[in-house]
Structure formats: C-alpha cells, structure tokens
Image (spheres, rainbow, N blue to C red):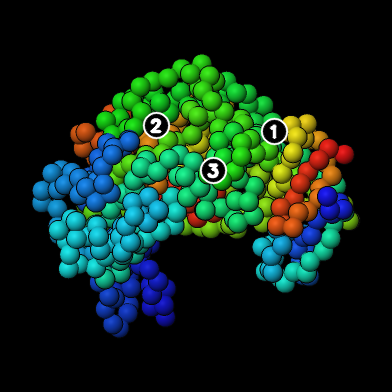
Amino acid sequence: MLKPRFMGNGRRISACARRTATAFCARPLPAPMPRAHVSAVGIVPFGRLDTPLLTLARAAHNDLLRRSPDASAPDQLLLSCQEPGPFADIGNAAVAVTDALGLAGIAATRVDTAPSSGLAALATATALVESGRRKSVLVLGVETMTSAPTEEANRVLARMAHPLERRYGLTMGAQIAIMARRYMEQHGIDDAALADCAVKAHDMGAANPHAQFRGPIDRDTVLGSPVVADPLRLYHSAALSDGAAALLVSAAGPVRVAGLGHATDALALTHRTSPDRITHFAATRQAAQQALGEAGIAPSDLDVVETHDAFTPMEGINLEDLGLFPRGTGVARVARGDTRPDGAVPTNLGGGLKARGHPVGATGVAQIVELYGHLTHEPGLSEHPPRAQRPRWGLAHNMGGLGNNVLVAVLEGRP
Amino acid sequence: MSPPGVTVARCTACSIRLHPMRPDCTACRGATTSEQIPGTGHVVSWTRIERPPAGFPAPQRVVLVEADGPDGATVLLYAQATDDAVLQTGTRVQLHEATDATVRAEPR
C-alpha cells in the first residue's frame, strides 16, 4: 500500500522513507532519479560587439571549456535565442549553432519563450537530465540585436505584444511606463527615487567584467537623459545588446537546480484578471511559489537574487512579486540601497539586465552564470559578492513578454 | 468621428467584460458575447511615447482607461489620446472606437 506514494517524481523521498519503503515493499524501488546540476559555465562580455551570432556562441562555449576543461561532452544542445531570423538572418538556428560549436551529430533544439528563453532552456535541460533521457545538456543563450537600427529593433521586439497593443505603438518599455506610473502614483515614488534604481544598477555593472555598462552614473545623468516613454528615460531601459552565455547541465556539479517554476498570463495586459494587473505580474508570483516550494525554502532563505529588470522600476516590483519585499515598498527599497551587496536582499549584483545588457536569448543563461559565480566563488564571474559569507541559495527570475511567460529557478550551492 | 461607445467581450458565465474582444473569458473560460458599452470612463495611467517603433509618428499618447460599464462594473482598455490634456490620471474621457478596433480618448 505504500508503493503509490513513491511513484511520483521521487524528489521529496527522504533517505528514511526510502529505507522504510524498501523494507516493506515486495519489489525494490527504481533507482533514484538523477538530480540536475549546473556543472560548468561560460560567458562573453555583453555590449555592441559587431560580431556574428555564431562567433559569439563559439566564444561562450570556448569560455566554458577553458574554465572547465574536464567538462563532459554534451549529448544535446538547447539553444536559447529569441530572434535569430530578424536580428541575425539565421534560420535552422539550433543546428547552425551546434555545427558552429563543432558538435554536429548530437540532438539540437531551439527553445523560445521570448526573453525568458534562457531559463526555459534550463528547465528543459533539467527535465531531460532528471528523466534520464540525457546525461549532459549544453544550454547556449545568444542574441545579436545591435545590427538593426533602434526603431527597427523595437518594432521586432514589439511583436511580443498583443496585436491591438501594437496598433497603439506600444513597446515593452511603453507598457512598463504605464505600469510604473500607476505604481509611482499609488506608492508615492518620485522621479528621483526611480533614477536611484538606475544608479544602483550601473554601480553593480561597473564591477562586472561582462557588463555592457561599466561606468557609474549619478541621479542627474538619469534625469537629464531623453524621455523614451514618460516617465521612463533612456537610462531606465536596458540597452539593445549582443552577447552569449553557456551552461552545462548534468547529474553532478557544484550547483544544484533545486526548484523550478513556470507560469503564463494572458497575452494582453487588459485581458488579465488579477486585482493588481496594472502594477504587478501574477505569473511571477505563481512561478516563484512553485520554485521555492519545490526547493523547500522561503524567500527569506535566499542569499542572492537575479531578477528581470529590463526597465528599472521592475527590480522593485518583481521583488515584491517574488515575496522578498512587502507590497508597495520594493521600488523605494531598491532606491535606498537595500538590494546592494550588503543590503537585506542582494539583487542583480552584476548590474542586472539594465547594466549587464539584455541580449534577450542570452539573458536567462547569464543570470545563472552570475548566480553560479556567487555560489561557487569561481573567479572572473562576479565581483560584488553578497553579504552572506557562504551563500547557499540563489534565485533567478526571467520574464518573457510583458510578464506573461515567466520562469523562476532556485539554485543551491554546496554548503 | 464614430459615435461614443466601445464593443467589448462579455462572459456569458461570469459576466466579466474584457477589451479587446475575444471568444473566451480569461477568468472562467466561459464563452463571451459582444456588448456595446457607453464609452465614458477615466484615465488610470498613461504614457507619452517619444521613441515609438518604426512606422509610428512621435509622440504616441496612450492612456489606460477604466471604462464605465452599464451596471457599475468597469472595463480596462488602452486608448489613443490626440491631445496632451488627456494625459493626466483621473481625467474623465469620452471613448470612440475606430474601424481598426483601436479606441480614441478625448476629454469629456
């Protein structure tokens, strides 16, 4: 009678329960499921690189091989790339990248959930490894966005929105501007506080060897920059960027994939039904609850966080949805430094999307690389350690579209 | 200009109203029917887009409106404002629907 309880995913079976089951069941239990770990990482500096997509992919893979010469050979490649056609004139992109890496022969699949593709690829790699279907999966995130003029790039990216939203000329940034204005009016946030969120992001990027923006800025720089979509200015927006990052996911490694969450919401903002849909993202809350629940930890256990701040108001708003700050306080807490390395919730210590740069397909993978740096102390990955001496738990939050395809991953370093 | 009013989706099961029109309800998955609402409401947020995507003149003035429903319920929708006077939270607006299903907002 015990057996059906142990037919699930096996994740939560304690050693004691397993012994009990073995003692009482007529048939032996199947071997425990492999657990997915991040076993190696690689990254290139992000920016306006004037470098072909396949060259960047190779460079990130080479960085992984240089850091981890003994890394196992992958038996599948998962490509995270949102727009290989419009931005790089590449079709059949999974095999184009696999071939460029000298890996032709292995399985290759492109994963696309818009800018959350990086964590979607990690989630897919985790499922492949934990099912036993694959031994070792290479997750390669890459995007080249800067060859097109900005207006054209914005037109390509605006295709993520509902067709009627696009007919108003709404970009992702313009929709975040509308959400941010409502939030600011409800919670008494002024332009100076919002500017301080951008200052914090650039301070973090200044010490990240892979960040697009490595020069600190001050409040006046932000407030003096051109308006993109009122109240958001140029310095509130992550720049168009080129970049690549890589992960190897296998059954052993220094960082465990301890929890994953994935949730969607209606494509159009006005079709959503959560009471706070004008200011917050219900899909983030759902994904976070799943991921933290699977890891068996509370938000307060987290030592370091990576959140999807494509626009600066999102750092504080997302941290509220992730359960790390009370409602209505997040943006003010970011502005006053509570997400800096010595703050209550060390977040985006590599500059986040805002200062590291946001090559959409590479972003989620870069978030995992950043957390891997904090959890393993591997040199050359992160220069702003969180206040915890030996950080154990990290969380990455990666958003596709306007908060409508959201993934959260909880990572555990070796204690 | 078209007479005031906007076509919205009304759920036949839970009565929620959604814009733009869609065949099913995002709250309960019930079927919807189209319904005309009066075309009055107020601005709950707004932006003035100075750098729109390729193909749009700058600036684009977009307001998020809570439109008044016939029975006191509201409908959330985006609308284009032709004039900066509408870009103020709380402004009462009159809504008109264009042939491409976009909505225009002007001060009442």
Q: Which residue is mark 3?
A: B53
Foreground mark, 2 or 3, reads 3
Q: Give residue B84's position: percent from left, percent from top.
A: 74, 31
Foreground tag (1 vs 2):
2
Q: On the rendered structure, is A116 left or right of A21?
A: right
Residues packed near mark 2 inside 10 Å, few (<14), some (14 to 19) or many (20 plus): many
Q: Residue at x 42, y 73 (%)?
A: A5
Q: Are marks 1 and 2 on the same chain?
A: yes
Closer to us: A300 or A110: A110
- The quarter in which the N terminus of chain A is drawn is bottom left
Which amino acid type corresponds to the residue marked 3 in the rendered image?
Pro
- Residue at point 52%, 53% (across, down): A159
Image label count: 3
Front-most of residues A220 and A303: A220
Disc 2 and disc 3 in contact, CB within 8 angstroms: no
* Quarter of the image where one finds residue B34: bottom right
